[in-house]
Image (cartoon, helix red, strand yellow):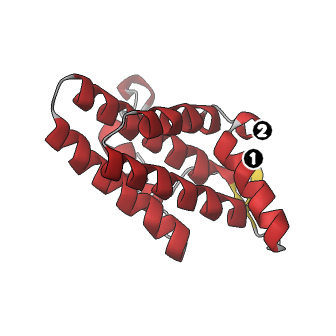
Amino acid sequence: MKTYVLCPVSDKQIDGSVARISALLAFALISIFGLTQSIIPVAFLAVDFMLRSANLPAYSPLAFASRRIAGTLGIGKNYTNAGPKIFAARLGLFMTCLIIISLLLNAGWLAYILAGILGLFTFLEAAFGVCVACEIYPYLYRYLYRPDDKFNG
């Protein structure tokens, strides 16, 4: 039985600089939600997270804009494993869906708490390159991982 696990690993690589710019744009959208109380930026972000979590970054508006910004600013490519970023996008999708559900159920206070948490996660990635999803993954994995007893003796 596994006693530890690291963030998911993929055979694909992505540009880490583009990922950090995408996190900055996600932070901006969450901030717009906080200022305007409009569901539109959260819904847009949910669709974008859905595309990235489905490993379709070519269709992600934030990834497209981030690539353009990186190219315009002449930011060099910094390749990193795509696995943690895909997991982070899935976590972002989950959180944006919870925010939308909270808003639809008139639990605005919960939506703002969740948006604050998501905003913190995106800020940490954008400003410092800290992937909070990678810190969460081992605990989630341990909670959800159930070894099949018939194969473990």
User: Does residue 72 appear to the left or right of 50 in the view shown?
Assistant: right
Q: Within 10 angstroms of label 1, few (less than 14), some, or many (20 or more) residues?
A: some
Asked if residue 93 is positioned above or below residue 33 in the image, the reply reads above
Tag 2: amino acid: Ala
Let me know if residue 141 appears in the view. yes
* Callout 1–callout 2 Cβ contact below 8 Å: yes
Residue positioned 77% across, 56% down in the render: 67
- Residue 58's disc is 2
Residue positioned 56% across, 56% down in the render: 25
Q: Nearer the viewer, residue 117 or 86?
A: 117
Q: Position of residue 110 (x, y in %)?
A: 18, 41
Q: Position of residue 146 (x, y in %)?
A: 35, 33
The residue at which mark 1 appears reads as 64
Q: Position of residue 87 (x, y in %)?
A: 53, 45
Look at the numbered disc 1 and give the secondary structure of its residue: helix
Look at the numbered disc 2 and give the secondary structure of its residue: helix
Asked if residue 95 is positioned above or below residue 128 in the image, the reply reads above
Residue positioned 83% across, 66% down in the render: 72
Residue positioned 68% across, 51% down in the render: 82
